Image (tube, rainbow, N blue to C red):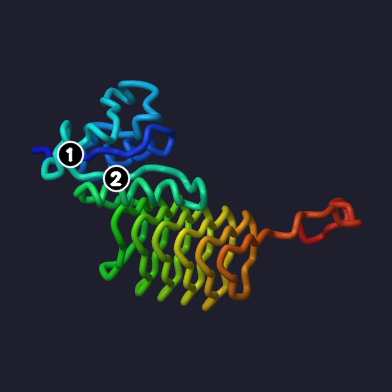
Amino acid sequence: MSKPTLPLVIFGAGQIAELAWFYFTHDSAYTPVAFVVDRQFLRETHLLGLPVIPFDELSERFPQDTVHAFAALSYANINAVRARAFNELRTAGYRCVSYVSSRATVFPDLRIGDNCFILEDNTIQPFATIGDNVTLWSGNHIGHHSVIEDHCFISSHVVVSGGVKIGANCFVGVNSTIRDHVTIGARCVIGAGSLLDRDADAEGVYTAVPAERSRVPSSRLRSI
């Protein structure tokens, strides 16, 4: 006997919304029933076989007590676009749910907010706290006692060491490493491949040093 599923509307109609449809359909108790967008961004009436409806018609088509919701948007404007959609859904009375991949490593005490998107191969250690509307793309390590505040986007293969605090609305690029007990202020951008070994002030942009060619050719390296 198949298990019962819960209807879900997805805010967004781009690639991340398509991915949300895939993950919720194949790896959750929720069944997507529609996509929703702001009316000015309505470009098509159907996506992946489901209706695409304007937000101002959502409560009429899918009343708040009949569906759950998920805001599936990117990190545009340092996550402000996704934050706005999430807040609009909650203000309208919809309950935003989170997705945690069955292929992620989590523990029973995981503290996680609403509208989180935690994909496969994430390892979240005990005593970590994840706020509302946080995206953890695939393959990250979130260390013990770390805190990721609301509306953050953590790209793939990021190492967040123990006791780290990442402020609201931050973006952390792929292959970044954050040393233990570092505090990152709100609305920071950490560039791909960066090593952050000290506290970061709010609204900062931190990037890795660009790679430079060594004077020694690869043919002379003995350890590779």
Quadrant of the image containing the C terminus: bottom right
Where's residue 68, x and y in %?
20, 45
Farthest residue to the left: give it.
1
Query: Callout 1: helix, strand or loop?
Result: strand
Q: Specify whether residue 102 is in view.
A: no
Is residue 186 rendered to the left or right of residue 63?
A: right
Which comes before the other along the chain, label 1 or label 2?
1
Q: Nearer the viewer, residue 143 or 191?
A: 191
> Eyeballing the image, is 19 above or below 191?
above
Where's residue 186, x and y in %?
50, 65
Asked whether the residues under the numbered discs 1 and 2 touch, taking CB atoms below 8 Å apart as contact, a structural biologist would say no
Tell me which amino acid carries mark 2: Phe
Where's residue 208, x and y in %?
69, 59
Where's residue 34, x and y in %?
25, 31
How packed is label 2: few (under 14 Cα within 10 Å), some, or many (20 or more)? Answer: many
Residue at 38% x, 71% y is: 128
Disc 2 target residue: 70
> Eyeballing the image, is 185 above or below 84?
below
Residue at 52% x, 61% y is: 187
Q: Quadrant of residue 194?
A: bottom right
Residue at 53% x, 70% y is: 184
Tell me which amino acid carries mark 1: Pro
Query: Callout 2: helix, strand or loop?
Result: strand
Residue at 76% x, 55% y is: 210
Q: Nearer the viewer, residue 194 or 67?
A: 67
Q: Nearer the viewer, residue 24 or 217?
A: 24
Quadrant of the image containing the N terminus: top left
Disc 1 target residue: 7
